[in-house]
Amino acid sequence: MSINNLGSTLGSFLGAALASVLNISTAQFDNLALGLGVQLIGTLLPVGFLFLIPKEVTGLTS
């Protein structure tokens, strides 16, 4: 449970930092699409590393 809370907290801080770096605010949405793209890539990036998990650990035999 604490890992989930840590991940949620870090995600909130990183999202706020990204919005700050890209100057996204309540009055300015110019870089919103870029921010969403960065978050999408950050979310999908771990999928590219799934091949590193050994098949014995996942229970797959093929």
Image: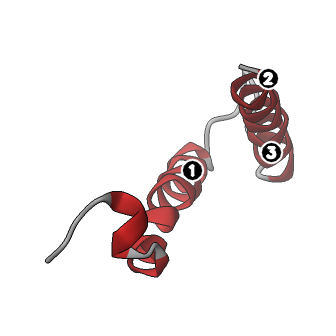
Residue 47 at x, y percent in the picture: 41, 65
* First reached walking from the N terminus: tag 3 or tag 1: 3
Work out whether 55 lies above or below 14. below
Q: Give the foreground label among 2 and 3.
A: 2
Q: Are marks 2 and 3 in contact (CB under 8 Å)?
A: no
Total label count? 3
Residue at x 62%, y 50% (from the top left corner): 31
Q: Which mark is residue 39?
A: 1
* First reached walking from the N terminus: tag 2 or tag 3: 2
**Does 51 sit left or right of 4 as displayed?**
left
Q: Compute the Cα span from label 2 to label 1.
A: 23 Å
The type of residue carrying mark 1 is Gln
Q: Which mark is residue 18?
A: none
Residue 35 at x, y percent in the picture: 61, 50
Could you classify mark 1 by the number of other residues whose Cα lies within 10 Å: few (under 14), some (14-19), or many (20 or more)? some
Quadrant position of residue 28 = top right
Q: Which mark is residue 2?
A: 2
The type of residue carrying mark 2 is Ser
Residue bearing mark 3: 23
Q: Nearer the viewer, residue 39 or 22?
A: 39
Badge 1 marks a residue whose secondary structure is: helix
Quadrant position of residue 10 = top right
Q: Nearer the viewer, residue 43 or 60?
A: 60
Residue at x 80%, y 43% (from the top left corner): 14
Q: Quadrant of the C terminus?
A: bottom left
Q: Nearer the viewer, residue 59 or 12?
A: 59
Residue 51 at x, y percent in the picture: 39, 79
Q: Quadrant of the N terminus?
A: top right
Residue at x 43%, y 76% (from the top left corner): 54
